[in-house]
Amino acid sequence: MPRVLLVPAVVAGGFFLLPLVGLCLRAPWSDIAAHVAGPEIRAALFLSLRCSLSAALISVVLGLPLAVWLASGASRLHAVVRVLVTLPMVLPPVVGGVAMLLAYGRNGIVGAPLDKWLGLALPFTSQGVIVAETYVAMPFFVLTVEGGLRSLDPRFGDAAATLGAGPWRVFRTITVPMIAPSLRAGLLVAWARALGEFGATITFAGNLAGKTRTMPLAVYVALETAPDAAIVLSLLLVVTAGSVLILLRRQWFPAR
Amino acid sequence: MSLRADIELRRGGTELHVDLDVAAGETVALVGPNGAGKTSCLLAIAGLLRIDRGRISLGDRLLDDGETFVPPEARAVGVVFQEHLLFPHLSVLRNVAYGLRTPGLSRQAAHSTAVSWLARVGIAEEYHDKRPGTLSGGQAQRVALARALAMSPALLLLDEPLAAVDASARLELRHELRSHLATFAGPRIVVAHDIADALALADRIVVLENGSVVQTGTTDELVRCPRSRYVADLVGWNSFAGTCRGGIVDTGAAQLKVASPIEGDVLVTVHPRAVSLFPERPAGSPRNVWAATVVRLEPLADRVRVQLTGVLPLVAEVTRAAVEDLGLAEGSKVWVAMKATEMSVTAR
């Protein structure tokens, strides 16, 4: 490594380290247990975990087939769909939330008939949180997995076909196991994105304590009323996300 | 059950039109320069590439005629791919058993069939649970062959089976492959880049150039009378392209006397043994004579191949005694002579 790069590299490292240091220095360590034990924080934490895991799961179930289709061709339709999928990644999540209200809200183009005939209303419910988080998280899964599929040598599928395997068996026994690293990576980033989701959630699902107030929303609310609680909540999120990263790193991304 | 394949397809910029018949128990080698369409032929027969027109049938079973199309998984065509394509996430044993996991066959039965095939190709039991990535080129080739044969295919296709094997293991593996092919009852097609592989494995050789067959014949026929520059180079003959008028071929660099009535564009081929070397300019007879310089000497059994530069680049094959008599070494000046009657001329 050339020495000139060392200084900016250290600056960049510090840039990411200092906010964590700030959190740790300002945390009210003496009564942290009381904060964490509070029923509101517990509710927010469990709601966050439940919704983000559900969103990650839905991203896999719906996103994998979409990724397979995206990787299967290069038509104009593929390009259009890829833009559609990428949009939530670059759009401000608030805008995504507004757009979702217009589609899946009570008066939305899909939401209204859902409400009328099935009595199903998504906005301001935990299901709404899951929908909002999925909207923002699934693109990360789809694009990661599509990348994995595109770098998979299709001749392995050909070899399996000559051995008598039909398309479904090839998918199950060759494609999925061979792109496992991308599946894991995609799942991890999608889950992390869902866990941190704020804008789309507050716009589409609101900010109802115990119902739709996830951790990021709780941090935001607490920052105005009880800054100490906000710091504890933030630390809790850092620890949760950080420990998952550390736990899965060894298992999912073995050292080369 | 013999294979009849009349393949017409366009892929990328090249058009492929190949007519190929392979009898049961016969091995045909497809040879040709890169991009000639050898692999496309195999893919079409395996069902991995659809033909535009033509007809592929195995025995009385139609596989593809441009409309009816039997998918690869229903063809029972065993393929050994160029880089073997062993599934990296499955053990060696499970690779071989992969084609055996069809309805009606228990896991146990598949397992024991795979074990016996691995034994037949000479893969020791200690490798059964290893991942293919840990195998040598030769071992991977054996496993790939076992995987293709285990599902008892009706037809066997091998795409450059020895290309990923290092030179030291090649000779032995070629010999082994030959005996495995001999025990397989159906038609066999081997794509070979190396002519030595083709000569050793095949009963008949089909030469493809630019998507069509330029010559087909037994090894002997090819060696005796190469009909294109590619084939001549392949079998080690000298070849010159030129225009023939009145028994003289003009190659641009030289005028060659030939004994042929053909007029127009021709390919002249000369066997290296028909090139004689002299210390002085030889006299008399209708010969093609010129001065040349020795570039390289390659011993070949009891003979020596002498590479020469001169009016035209040439390879001569002479006895060891002749090399000593002439005192040949790199850089030696000699006279080359070729009789007109030894020059075989084919219209192009």
Image (spheres, rainbow, N blue to C red):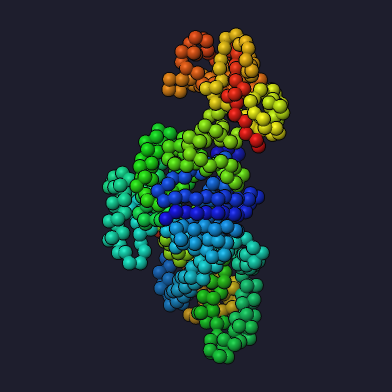
Q: Position of residue A16 (x, y in %)?
A: 54, 54
Q: How many marks?
A: 0
- Give the left or right position of residue B130, taking residue B302 as reference: left
| Residue A242 at least partly seen | no
Residue drawn at (58%, 76%), measured in percent from left and top? A202
Observer-nearest of B290 and B274: B274
Residue drawn at (53%, 42%), measured in percent from left and top? B216
Q: Which of the 4 quarters of the picture holds residue A33?
A: bottom left
- Determine the residue located farthest toward the front in the rendered image: B261
Q: Quadrant location of the N terminus of chain A?
A: top right
Q: Position of residue A119 (x, y in %)?
A: 53, 89
Q: Position of residue A5 (x, y in %)?
A: 59, 41
Observer-nearest of B86 and B161: B161
Residue drawn at (46%, 47%), measured in percent from left and top? B189
| Residue B212 at least partly seen | yes
Observer-nearest of B56 and B224: B224
Q: Position of residue B180 (x, y in %)?
A: 36, 45
- Indicate whether B59 appears above or below B257: below
- Give the left or right position of residue B21, taking residue B100 as reference: right
Residue drawn at (54%, 58%), measured in percent from left and top? B55
Observer-nearest of A192 and B331: B331
- Indicate whether A73 appears above or below B28: below
